[in-house]
Image: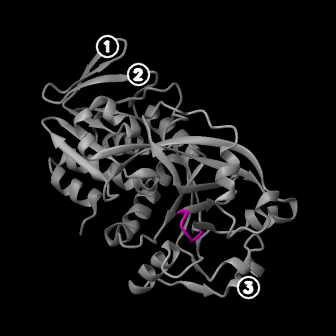
């Protein structure tokens, strides 16, 4: 069997890895000159892995398999490229998303440590205790190091005879024939095609626009005040800062930066449009975090990185199968944490000819 994988983000890399381990011949095609593509959802420095999932109980339960799949991958690529920081939930008003996350953990029996606002600010001095109502901590979460994962996977794939091709932009897919056509007119044929093209999927398969919407957003890397640098380096990630901004913080571990991002900072856009940050965009993103940050105006903006994601209306993964093709799209950046498990499930579905089971697991509606 020969499988062509289109797109070398975490899902494509993991699918190629899992297929190769099953003895399948794999060709992996990536449009960028680098893996991970710096413009892709997998191209940033780091991502969060966490148990909390609010009302998405299916994904909360699937974290066990996600951790198991990452462990298998670490054995192959020389990891772990995961820093177990745990995570904080910072609530500003009753019923905000931090509250929802905390309640879902407690109702399902997962341990959570609750802190009073002033106690939390004493432990984590970058927080303004006067602007928050509650803080919770969970040990089960941390930081996935995207670039180290990609480097390790590419090295493993090449060592295991996977044909990894960069600057190979796919512009056409024929599911019935099992072929893909590149921008330079080259054609590849396989027994099966897996499309994991991220935000570029609608360019290949515009008929999916009834299910997927592409958004452009950005994250900011901040330089904290000197007296808070050590506190940030030892802190958990912050899954949600409460209030209305849908904000998260990834702490500076293993040589990475202090990253902040906010769900409200997104707009509909094609994946290649508007990728240069606006002059004051970093400050705009930074200022979403006051509250709950103390002294937010003392943080410098080191870098702004634009991102493009696909979303489904209900924020679940999407998988479509037809003829000799499987199309997989994660919902926004939250898909990264499941990357290794997604690859294993896709590969098992192809080899075992049971794509329905793979789709059920990915879409997590149970």
Q: Are the residues at dot 1 and dot 2 in contact (C-beta closer than 8 Å)? A: yes
Q: Earlier in the sequence, mark 3 or mark 1?
A: 3
Drawn side of residue 65 relative to residue 130, left or right: left
Asked if the magenta segment contains residue 107, the reply would be no
Q: Is residue 228 above or below residue 255?
A: below
- Local secondary structure at mark 2: loop
Res. 232 image quadrant? bottom right
Is 251 situated above or below 34? below
Give the label, 3 or 1, closer to the camera: 3
Q: Which residue is mark 2?
A: 168
Q: Residue at x 54, y 59 (%)?
A: 48
Q: Main secondary structure of the magenta part?
A: loop
Q: As drawn, is 282 to the left or to the right of 14?
A: right
Of 119 and 352, the residue lying toward us: 119
Q: Which residues are magenta?
A: 241-246
Q: Identify the residue under disc 3.
A: 118
């Amino acid at each position: 069997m020969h499988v062509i994988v289109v797109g070398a983000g975490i899902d494509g890399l993991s699918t190629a890895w899992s297929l190769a381990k099953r003895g399948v011949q794999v060709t992996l095609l990536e449009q960028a000159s680098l893996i991970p593509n710096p413009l892709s959802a997998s191209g940033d420095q780091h991502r969060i892995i966490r148990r909390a999932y609010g009302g998405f109980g299916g994904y909360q339960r699937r974290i066990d398999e996600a951790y198991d799949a990452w462990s298998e991958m670490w054995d192959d690529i020389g990891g772990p490229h995961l820093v177990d920081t745990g995570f904080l939930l910072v609530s500003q008003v009753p019923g905000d998303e931090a509250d929802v996350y905390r309640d879902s953990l407690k109702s399902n029996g997962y341990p959570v440590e609750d802190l009073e606002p002033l106690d939390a600010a004493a432990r984590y001095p970058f927080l303004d205790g006067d602007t928050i109502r509650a803080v919770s901590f969970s040990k089960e979460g941390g930081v996935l190091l995207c670039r180290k994962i990609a480097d390790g996977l590419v090295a493993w794939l090449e060592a295991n005879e996977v044909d990894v091709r960069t600057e190979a932009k796919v512009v056409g897919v024929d599911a019935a024939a099992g072929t893909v056509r590149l921008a330079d007119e080259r054609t590849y044929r396989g027994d099966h095609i897996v499309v994991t093209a991220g935000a570029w999927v609608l360019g290949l398969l515009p008929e999916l626009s009834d299910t997927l919407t592409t958004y452009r957003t950005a994250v900011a890397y901040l330089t904290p005040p000197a007296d808070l640098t050590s506190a940030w380096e030892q802190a958990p990630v912050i899954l949600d800062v409460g209030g209305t901004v849908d904000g998260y913080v990834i702490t500076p571990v293993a040589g990475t930066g202090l990253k902040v991002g906010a769900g409200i900072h997104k707009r509909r856009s094609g994946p290649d449009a508007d990728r240069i940050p606006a002059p004051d965009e970093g400050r705009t993103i930074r200022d979403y975090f006051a509250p709950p940050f103390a002294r937010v105006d003392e943080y410098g903006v080191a870098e702004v990185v634009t991102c493009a994601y696909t979303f489904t209306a209900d924020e679940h993964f999407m998988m479509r199968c037809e003829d000799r093709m499987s199309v997989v799209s994660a919902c926004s950046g939250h898909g990264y944490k499941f990357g290794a498990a997604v690859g294993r499930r896709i590969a098992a579905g192809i080899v075992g000819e049971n794509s329905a089971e793979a789709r059920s697991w990915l879409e997590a509606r149970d």
